[in-house]
Image (cartoon, rainbow, N blue to C red):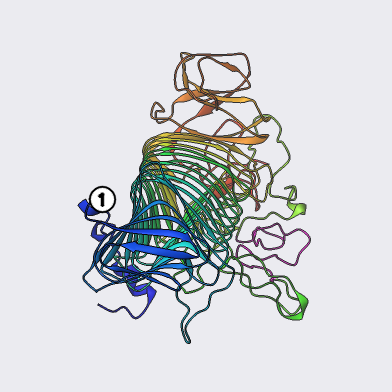
Amino acid sequence: MEYASFEEVAAAFDESALDLDYSKRDLDASYDASSATVITLSFDSTSVQGAGAQASAAGVVISSAGTYIVSGELTDGQLLVDAGDDDKVQLVLAGAIIHNEDGAAIYVRNADKCFVTLDAGTENNLSDGSSYALEDDSDEPYATLFSLCDLTLNGSGTLSVTSAYRHAVCSKDDLVVVSDTYNISAVEDGLRGHDSVKVRDGVFTIQADGDGIKSNKDDDPTKGFVSIDGGAFDIQAGDDAVQGKTLVRLAGGSMVVAANDDAFHSDLEMHLMGASIEASAGDDAFHAETKLTVDGGTVNVTSCNEGYEAERVYVNGGDTHIVASDDGVNASAADLSDDADADTVSNTLPNGGTPGALGKGGGAATPDAGGQAPAGARQGGQAPDSAAQQDGQAPGTAGAQQGGQAPDAAGAQQGGSVPEPPAGDNAGGAGGATGSGQQGGDPAADGGMGQADSNCLIQINGGYLVVDSVGDSIDSNGNVEVTGGVLLVSGPTSDGNGAFDYDGSATISGGTVLMVGSTGMAQSFTSGTQAFAMTSASGEAGQSVCMVDGSGNVMASFTATKRFGMVLASSPAFAEGGEYTLVIDGEVANAKADGYTDSGAVSGGSETAITASCTASAGVGGAGGMDAGGANGAGGIGGAGGPAAGGGK
């Protein structure tokens, strides 16, 4: 079936329909040496013993099915496979060195399938020059090892591929890697399969100026995927470390990746199932346009712009640590256009202005005559008012604007926080970041910055998720649902961002949550079947944050990585109306390296009483309110607007 657009491919995509298996022939690297044709390379000449191959002035041409054992060195030539449509060809590299100055070292022009088997204990090397002599009106081949048919790499030897032209290893159909050791250097992509890339095992060192591993077929919902079931990877990429058009599936193996762009990118879906990953990225660590599912594995993101990003993010399991310079986990609208990889709309706007980055709300701000976004710009635009904050907030006026930015004259400090109230007064007495700007706003109204997108969802059902972010830590342009797992957050110190940010609703029905961060944009849950509490409490980097029950038992703890002014907490042990104690900077017994434990005792520290509830307290500071004793608000601490309904200052 032909699909007219990638949107149609996306609508038809089903991960369960993909061919993720390996054939018996893929897994069988054996061969019969007695019946094989032997090809011997001798610098500028070749010799052939057996049927199906002929020496030529350019190297060797293989024209029929069979097994071919290749050894020796060819200083400037090519091993060409040009067999029948139904022929299966096995190339056994047994200490082969092939360099082609003006073309692919191995070119599989025609066959049903080609198997490249690395003979046990041998080292093999393929390389090319920086320009190819191509036929008229053709751009093929464009890789050092290039195949127009399905290509499988197996065996137990070593293959080094150095590409000075474009890609290192490329199949125009499926690329399957079963085993072996690979040292790959490429001026563009390292491993590339147009229809798919499937890796069962192997040891990979990949240095690519483009993508490390890539599949890019865009007109078939059963193709265009990368699936990794095992192997050990060290990938250094100038673009993405791993990129798939329809799916990136990480089911096993260990990966250390550093990418100038995204570490892992899919134009549709991504599925983390069991791999052990350490990643650093110049942009996002894990970016899928439509859906990102984390079912298992161990993920340690040491640096990135955003950690997990997709329209819908599901965390069901796994052990994740994310350090992000922007958002830790972000749900934003999918972009299925051809230029979905673009990070910004342009470098300049008319009349010399500078654009905002594509906003969390899904679009860049519209420029005014001076090139800046006008008041009321969506997230990503800069409002033209000295009191305006980042993320496209409107300028301060007599009342709070949508987005929750307070005017300085209302008593709130610039950035949305309010001065510390006298004891017993409400700390968040002016409607909050999620309110509509009305005094004592409705927690259910508006939902914060911009209009909520019902397609956007962050759902945390299990696993262990630790986030340290400069921007919003948990940020959804739609809704957030927490049903289980452990969520530990060290949020931003800037009042222009928050540890928790959503535009729709945020509910909790299970799991353990401890979030700390700045106060200016702070949001709590809107409701839940499990009680929660948000309170103002200050601490510094390296200090413990601990929830304690009435008997002094630790319910949950972790160590903050930066200073903070608020805490949002929930535990399965919380009861409606239950009174608990928040302990800052105490000594917690038997905690993990990041300070987490859900048992034991804490000694010392400063204490704050909190009261848990399954509903947000609309009467205390409205949508953003929260009193000093821990009453909940659906939005920020000390947002803009009028006095609280309860009379707080």
Residue 508, horizontal then vertical, whole percent:
40, 41
Instruction: Please state the extent of the stretch shown in magenta in the rendering.
Output: 373-402
Query: Is the residue 499 above or below the residue 243 in the image?
Result: above
Quadrant containing the C terminus in the rendered view: top right
- Give the residue at mark 1: 33
Residue 326, horizontal then vertical, whole percent:
61, 51
Q: Is residue 607 left or right of residue 40?
A: right
Query: Is the residue 554 above or below the residue 33 in the image?
Result: above
In the image, what residue type sits under mark 1? Ala
Q: Main secondary structure of the magenta part?
A: loop
Query: Of 291 and 83, which appears nearest the observer?
Result: 83
Q: Is residue 565 left or right of residue 232?
A: right
Task: Give me the residue at 66% from left, 46% from top.
Answer: 520
Task: Give me the residue at 63% from left, 33% from top.
Answer: 561
Packing grade of label 1 (10 A; few <14, some 14-19, many >=20) is few
Q: Does residue 379 show up magenta in the picture?
A: yes
Numbered marks: total:
1
Residue 129, horizontal then vertical, whole percent:
57, 67
Q: Is residue 453 visible?
A: no
Q: Is residue 364 visible?
A: yes
Image-quadrant location for residue 7: bottom left
Which residue lies most toward the bottom here?
Answer: 136
Quadrant containing the N terminus in the rendered view: bottom left
Q: Is residue 204 left or right of residue 37?
A: right
Q: Secondary structure at mark 1?
A: loop
Residue 346, horizontal then vertical, whole percent:
65, 73
Query: Of 73 and 11, which appears nearest the observer?
Result: 73
Query: Of 582 and 132, which appears nearest the observer?
Result: 132
Query: Of 522 and 244, which appears nearest the observer?
Result: 244
Q: Does residue 385 show up magenta in the picture?
A: yes
Q: Is residue 648 left or right of residue 556?
A: right
